Image (cartoon, grey):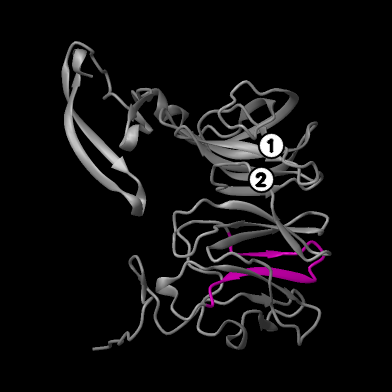
Amino acid sequence: MKAQVFEHLLYRHWNSYLGPKRSHVLVVSAADGNAVRDLTPRRDIGDAESPTFTLGGPVGYAWAPGSEEIAYVTNVDLVPAASTNNDVFTLLLDDAGARPRKVSTSMGSDDAPAYSPDGKYLAFRSQARATYESDRFRLMLFDRLAGTTKELLPKLDRWVDEFVWNPVNPEICFTTADHGGERIFCTYPNVGDSLFALPGKGEYGELQFAALKDVGYELVATKMTVESPSAVVALIRGDVKEFADREIASVSSQITTTEVRLTHLNDDLEQHLDLPKMTSFTFSGAEGAPVQGFMIPPPKFDVAKKYPLKFLIHGGPQGRGAMRGVIGGTRS
């Protein structure tokens, strides 16, 4: 029998045990595959991992455009089980004796470093509060020449879930939750608090800029709705118009968009399925706060009939539960 004794936390991530080894960021020479360099040695990060553990989140490292520097994420707190304080570090690669430089300053989690195409900036996400894993992720911008960091969209009251730099323009596009969907917004770091909305509705993700024939660089993303599984779409942007939805006060305008579906892997399957549409409703929660809910009827729903209802409350670590009821007729 082989066994391992754990005398400290954190010894497991969900169903994956940490064990005696740690993940490090390594670089391999393109000329010599045997020349491997550890960019996050124990002398710099101790017993920590780099990048830090993530459940399908953003990549925890990034190359500078000139390949002279790398940014990576790690948590060097002595008790990682009681800490969410991931930090972003940079390391010069041309100097063998260089030590890492911490560019993030918050006590919460900082992650997802990404250099601007011109190399002037390093963008990353940041949570302000310590030990609160559900704190809002803000979009931060580190000026590499000045050595200063600022919040790029201080008036935005939503999470920044994922973001991507435009390779030819000083522009960042990102996704954020909005009324049960995952919408796309774009901002220009050199133009104050500018924030532009794309009109598409659904759950967008995996943002990339791609060079499209006869169009130039445009956004490509995955899109999923309740009625349709994930597909790859191209978002060809057009004119800028005044934004009518003023609920997000920091949004100044909306960019008209032509959405082109690029993949059709599930077309045949969708033709044989009855996928009802989801409807949204609002009810009063604690202290009268409006809470949004959604209802999905069963296939071949008949309003004259009654059906069992499953009521699901999902909020991750802050609240979860389920209830059952009845749907149908006037009681829905």
| Residue that mark 2 sits on | 153
Q: Residue at x 46, y 82 (%)?
A: 21
Where does residue 179 sit, x and y in percent of width and height? 47, 32
Q: Are marks 1 and 2 in contact (CB under 8 Å)?
A: yes
**Most distant residue in the top direction:** 304
Q: Which residues are magenta?
A: 59-76
Disc 1 from disc 2: Cα separation = 8 Å
Q: Provide residue 105's location: percent of width, then percent of height.
A: 63, 67
Closer to the camera, 106 or 90?
106
Amino acid of disc 2:
Leu
Residue drawn 43% across the image and 78% down it: 79
Q: At which x and y percent is residue 17?
A: 36, 74
Quarter holding the N terminus is bottom left
Asked if residue 18 lies left or right of residue 178, the reply is left
Q: Residues within 10 Å of mark 1 (few under 14, many from 20)?
A: many
Q: Is residue 296 left or right of residue 69?
A: left
Q: Which residue is mark 1?
A: 195
Element type at marker 2?
A: loop
Q: Is residue 205 left or right of residue 281?
A: right
Q: Quadrant of residue 187?
A: top right
Circle 2 residues within 10 Å: few <14, some 14–19, many ≥20: many
Residue depicted at x 33% and y 23%: 274
